[in-house]
Image (cartoon, rainbow, N blue to C red):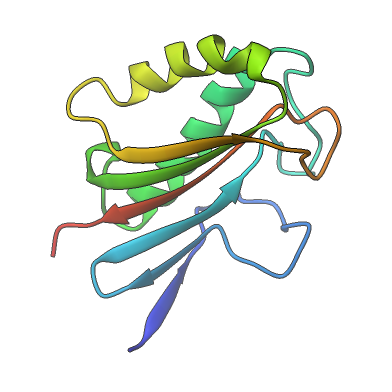
Amino acid sequence: MPKTSVIPPGSGAPLAPFVPGSQADNILYVSGTLPFDAENNVVHVGDAAAQTRHVLELIQRVVETAGGSMEDITFNSIFLRDWGDYSAINAVYAEFFPGEKPARYCIQCGLVKPDALIEIAAVAHLPR
């Protein structure tokens, strides 16, 4: 099955060998997305809500570049550094998914840069 890389205009070079999104048929896989600017610097250091908003906006850009919307996301994998940030993360998350929620899981773990508090990966089923 052929796949297509999805790279929103203005995206920075990733830290590792991956693309922001990969589409096969109508399924879009969004790579783990961290609160990075185009130069891979962590933004909003110490603010889990602002980092979550930034991450979800980056994911939204990938999904929209592929022709979809946040409503097309069916699954999210959420990685957070500290359970103390869970409620702040959920408050922002709920803004991006106000209607029917996607399935998800959330785990606490170390992230690639110490100032990053959140990482989210997503799967979307796009309209044909």
Lateral position of residue 89 relative to residue 125, left or right:
right
Lateral position of residue 108 relative to residue 68, left or right:
right
- State the residue in front, 86 or 97: 86
Quadrant in which the C terminus appears: bottom left
Q: Position of residue 49 (x, y in %)?
A: 58, 14
Which quarter of the figure has residue 4? bottom left
> Vertically, is 39 above or below 91?
below
Q: Position of residue 59 (x, y in %)?
A: 47, 42
- State the residue in front, 65 or 23: 23
Q: Residue at x 61, y 51 (%)?
A: 11
Which residue occupies the extreme right position in the image?
114
Q: Residue at x 35, y 18 (%)?
A: 94
> Vertically, is 126 above or below 115?
below
Which residue occupies the extreme left position in the image?
128
Q: Position of residue 36 (x, y in %)?
A: 71, 37
Q: Residue at x 78, y 38 (%)?
A: 110
Q: Position of residue 71 (x, y in %)?
A: 23, 38
Q: Residue at x 35, y 16 (%)?
A: 95
